[in-house]
Image: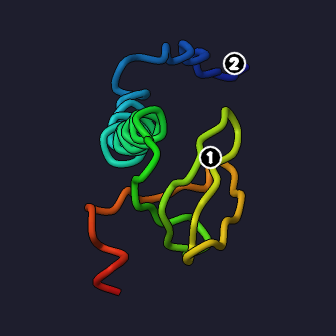
Amino acid sequence: MISLAHAQAAAPATPGLTDFLPLIIIFILFWFMLIRPQMKRAKEQKKMLSELAKGDEIVTASGQVGKVAKIGEQYVALEIAEGVITHVQKQSVQTLLPKGTIKSL
């Protein structure tokens, strides 16, 4: 008697640019707030390590302050007191101090 009415199936939504816009914005924010500054710091650190010379005053990552006595490819001889030399990895050099800083400590 009465035929059943069925709704027509909806067409599947095609993903557009507006669906990915939040992800794109988040990636751009991460790039400018996290990734780019970190790359810049790493580049500056690498440049500082390549320009390291005998007699420079440095601070290591562990907090040791001293004067560079000898530089190798992987290690730096660090004079922390008169006649006291320690060897630290080159990568642990964190900061290059201005000349005369150790005398003022």
Quadrant, the N terminus: top right
Q: Mark 1 points at which residue?
A: 90
Check if mark 1's residue and mark 2's residue have beta carbons within 8 Å. no
Q: Along the line of sight, which residue is nearer the eye, 20 or 81?
A: 81
Residue extending furthest toward the front: 83
Residue 7, compared with residue 21, is above or below; it is above
Q: Is residue 20 above or below residue 45?
A: above
Q: In this view, does 89 lie above or below 59?
A: above
- Badge 2 crowding class, 10 Å Cα cut-off, few under 14, some 14 to 19, many 20 or more, is few
* Residue 30 image offset from top left, x and y in percent: 40, 43
Q: Residue 81 carries which label?
A: none
Residue 77: quarter of image: bottom right
Q: Which residue lies at the image location 55% right of the left edge and 53% below the top edge?
A: 69
- Residue drawn at x 59%, y 60% is 78
Residue drawn at x 44%, y 61% as measured from the top left = 58
**Mark 1, secondary structure of its residue:** helix
Which residue appears farthest toward the bottom when viewing the image? 105
Q: Which residue was labeled with disc 2?
A: 3
Q: Which amino acid does label 1 sit on?
A: Lys
User: Measured from the top left, where is residue 49 in percent x and y?
Assistant: 48, 40
Tell me the SS state at disc 2.
Answer: loop
> Along the polypeptide, which appears first: circle 1 or circle 2?
2
Tell me: 63 left or right of 55.
right
In depth, the one of 53 and 39 nearer the eye is 53
Q: Which residue is drawn at 64% across and 21% down?
A: 6
Quarter of the figure that contains the C terminus:
bottom left
How many angstroms separate mark 1 from mark 2 (CA)?
84 Å
Q: Is residue 78 above or below residue 15?
A: below
Q: Which amino acid does label 2 sit on?
A: Ser
Q: How far across and how far down the image is residue 13, in percent?
A: 50, 18
- Camera-near label (1 vs 2) is 1
